[in-house]
Amino acid sequence: MSVPSTRTEPASPTWTPAVWIAGVVGFLGSLAVLAGSLSVGWLASISPVNRWSWLIPWRTTEYGVITGTVMLTLGCWLMFWGWLRLGKVVRFSGRGGLGIVNITTAAWSLPLLACLPIFSRDIFAYIGQGRLMVAGQDPYESGISTLSNWFQLGADATWAQTETPYGPVFLWIEQFVMAVAGPDDPDLAIFLFRLTAVAGVVLIMVYVPKLATLLGTDAARAQWITTANPLLLISFVASGHNDALMTGLAVAGVWYAATGRGLLGVLLVTASMGIKPITMVLLPFIGLLWAGRGASWARRFGYWFLTAGISGLIMVLVGMLNGFGYGWLTVMLTTGTGSVPWSPLGIMADATKVILNSLGLADEWVLSAFKTIGRILSVIIVIWLMFRGRHEHLMQRLTWAFTALVVLTPIIQPWYLLWLLPFFAVIGIRDDWQLKWVVFTVAFFLAFGAADQLFVWQFLGIGDQLAHLATLLSWGCMVWILLLDPWTSSIMKEEWHVRPALRRAVARLRRSERTPDETSPRKTKTRQGMTPP
């Protein structure tokens, strides 16, 4: 059977049968994820859901958890297949394409609202930290183990002695949720935290198309890459990560700053910092957007000071109101231990340890050394991007500065990459190796998430076997969808265009070296693609 090409396949902005098929398959995948989560998703031990008679066999028998693992895994890949198929049958240009993507995304999200937490247990940490706030304790100084019965509320033991890494605004949200839900209703608390994350997803859905249109990128395509993405929907809706709200506020703030409303942009990005302080890196570029095209160096420095002053004053006032002062800043600078095997610094640190061990040398210092090097290098990159590059490439500079801060750390959780995806989508992701890289990354972390963090009672003794089963199913689905399926495999089989991309990057680098000042009056057409400035 011949493989249809993206360039020749008919596409339409209307609800054709092909569009319906993609949407229905993704929705069935979302329903399967919901069903699987009821078997191997996470529950607090005090949750009354544990005592539902019809659910007990689904969670406490080998047959039940095996079936649940299969359904959860296959559901993830049905969503993935529907996502890729949707991207091939919808004509993105025009308002109709954006509407189709929005409706499909909303439909796929609905079953995930009812999921038990999957892919991560962080939402249970929110419950514990909210209880700390209600009890009048400082989450920047105390771990949740200071609470009575903390383990019964589902939090991972790693949070027992760990200070919160979240900003002071999210601490207020945690306190409000726990004040409403009470200390003994973790299920209601989870639902309320999930609604908070959904609010972030809605912000992303609203402002990604706006920002893409402003930058001359196809709005519907940017929306498809970002919010219809199954990794984003599972991580932000089913898992309920507060990163959704952080990202949504950041994207909204950038859009307002880019459209001449700098003060509102600063306020929204500062609110994003209040969820997770890492979006502080966006503030210098918000200041440049506020200063405007052709701004003198004096004007740029003036707006940098104004942006930093407004944001800093707000955070000081928040610290005074909640009594925690600069605890969020201290935690931001000191948290983060260990590494993950897919981070660049983690890979280099592990390789260095292997070499040192083979020579009989001590290796305890390696990870901290690489972590320090990564932080210094990321700061250098951010400062360089603040001062170098033309104004019309300001969004690219902002995106790559944010990327440097995320990538140059030993710990890169799958949902951390979702912080960056909206920004890359709005500056433009080409159909060559760039889109393939996004697709591969989503597939990799779906496979990882489906096998990781499965809840299986210890007395069953098959936790490792279920992880292997999920991994095997994921590999089979990946091979079929990306290499064999006639409708979606063309995404990976078409031209990668790596060499031309490298030649263009070298040419742009040479031109930028000949044009060091961004105040040049030349007008350059916005280019689509993940192009370094």
Image (tube, grey):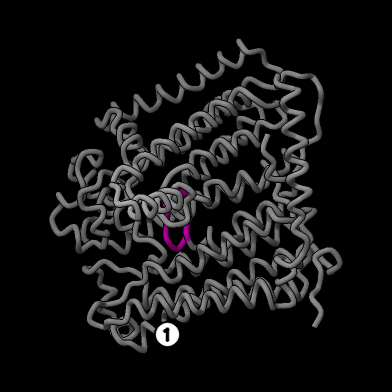
Q: Which residues are magenta?
A: 235-243
Residue 244 visible somewhere in the drawing: no
Task: Reply above or below: 484 against 212.
Answer: below
Q: Specify the farthest residue to the front.
A: 359
Residue positioned 77% across, 40% down in the render: 527
Is 451 magenta? The answer is no
Task: Reply above or below: 533 against 40.
Answer: above
Q: Specify the farthest residue to the bottom.
A: 63
Left or right of 527? Residue 472 is: left
Is 238 magenta? The answer is yes
Q: Residues within 10 Å of mark 1 (few under 14, many from 20)?
A: some
Q: Which residue is mark 1?
A: 67
Which is more toward the observer, 62 or 234?
A: 62
Residue positioned 54% across, 38% down in the render: 402
Left or right of 334? Residue 228 is: right
Amino acid type at image mark 1: Thr
Left or right of 342? Residue 156 is: left
| Quadrant that contains the N terminus | bottom right
Left or right of 379? Residue 292 is: right
Q: Specify the farthest residue to the top.
A: 298
Q: What is the x, y in percent for residue 324?
A: 26, 32
Q: What is the x, y in percent for residue 374?
A: 45, 38
Which is more toward the observer, 441 or 76?
A: 441
Task: Reply above or below: 87 against 354.
Answer: below
Image quadrant of residue 450?
bottom left
Q: What is the x, y in percent for residue 337?
A: 32, 47
